[in-house]
Image (tube, rainbow, N blue to C red):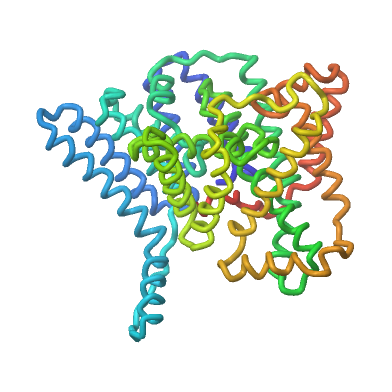
Amino acid sequence: MLFNSLNYLIFFPIIFMLYWWLNDKSLKWQNIMLLAASYYFYGCWDWRFVFLLAFSTGLDYFSGIIIYEAKTKLKKKIWLFLSIGINLGFLGFFKYYNFFIDSFGELLKNSGFQIHYSTLQIILPVGISFYTFHGLSYVLDIYYDKIKPSYNWVNYTLFVSFFPLLVAGPIERATHLLPQLETPRKFNYTKAVDGLRQILWGLFKKIVIADNCAAFANEIFNNSAHQSGSNLVLGAIFFTFQIYGDFSGYSDIALGSARLLGIELLKNFNFPYFSRDMAEFWRRWHISLSSWFKDYLYIPLGGSKGGNWMRIRNTFIIFLVSGFWHGANWTFIFWGGINALFIMPSIIMKTNRNNIEIVAKGRYFPNFKEIFQLVSTFILTTFCWIFFRANSLSHAFEYISGIFNKSFFSVPSIPYATVFLLIIFITIEWLGREGNYALEKLDLKLGKPLRWLVYVLIIFAIGMFMQTEETPFIYFQF
């Protein structure tokens, strides 16, 4: 079931009404209903993978309890490694089996060995990377004595499978979400309105911005050998906005839907294209994944304690792993590697900031230094996205080499309507950059009549560009 579908438009209001009606009955039945709705939501993709989700959830639930109650360190480690091994084993089989077989076969072939091997037609269970990381963080937190296990099967299962975040995040932590599921919620009108506003902006990002940019990005990337250099630059820019509008749009709808149910999810995007360097970009992009790797990989590897060499080594490791997490293709690993490379100046010069200041805070326009930083960071980011979007490394390098020729200076085939929409989108994002999402602070920038005019125009644009066949969100493949 897609957020941008008629099915969800029917599904969510029904859940919303049942949910708040049960609020007066008992928290237990409210959570049971929400759990049933979440499994139904997931089963709409492919009912067979519901059993995989249930098995993974049960494994981590019982592992957490056994680790917590274990009397010896050895028993704790055995169950920790069992949980990690099985979870990563499923993830590796469904997501990376063919990648490893193909890569191993190519290696042997290049070494002079002729072998016959076969790949499998494996269907990737939607959301497996996300719910696997939910469970792993829970078990690891128990092992390191950061939390106690939940003995309530319904609450824990709902933590893993809560439908707004189930298939594409954000990647939640038990310390943040579980206490909310264990505490009675009260309907808050102000938060509900805010949730609707964030859903509206998420739908605009997906349907109006991402899907329009995707049409041109796909055309240019799929026929890159026949495009001019200027068109290839345009295609890369369109994909840059496509992936942001698509993924952050999903996150906005997820956060807004959860807020309507009285639940706050982790913020996943913080206006990443208004970053002043690549390190800042990665503190603003897919925040829940970046923080996950920091807490469960970067810090256990030693973090920054060993000086520059340790920071450099560990940064490359987490970015290469992050690239591999995104997909079974060398393009993703290379994408992670060049992102790490572009972050190196911040690591070496120790300008990697933990607290990110809002660019041009309190001002409508950035200064010349900020403009240079914003533009240069956007160019580097767009360059990296070429590898993320390309079908293979050879395709990516051919795409880049196609940019740097005489046709770079030719006039590109500009879809003016889409460019006009992008200008409006960037303007609203810029004006709203001091909020959690663009429309949150709109009432502070505009008067009430103008604010409502913007809402009406957004709704009109969503209706005008809504397609009869809904397009899946880009991160479902990860």
Residue 28 occupies quadrant: top left
Residue 383 x, y percent position in the rendering: 66, 54
Along the viewing direction, whichever of 67 and 124 lies nearer the viewer: 67
In the rendered view, would you say 159 is above or below 404?
above
Along the viewing direction, whichever of 469 and 71 lies nearer the viewer: 71
The residue at 82%/50% (across/down) is: 418
Q: Does residue 341 appear in the picture of this structure?
A: yes
Along the viewing direction, whichever of 213 and 345 lies nearer the viewer: 345
Q: Does residue 163 appear in the picture of this structure?
A: no
Q: Is residue 438 left or right of residue 63?
A: right
In the rendered view, would you say 385 is above or below 142?
below
Residue 286 x, y percent position in the rendering: 55, 39
In the rendered view, would you say 405 is above or below 96?
below
Residue 78 occupies quadrant: top left
Q: Is residue 37 left or right of residue 200?
A: left
Q: Is residue 254 left or right of residue 221?
A: left
Residue 302 occupies quadrant: top left
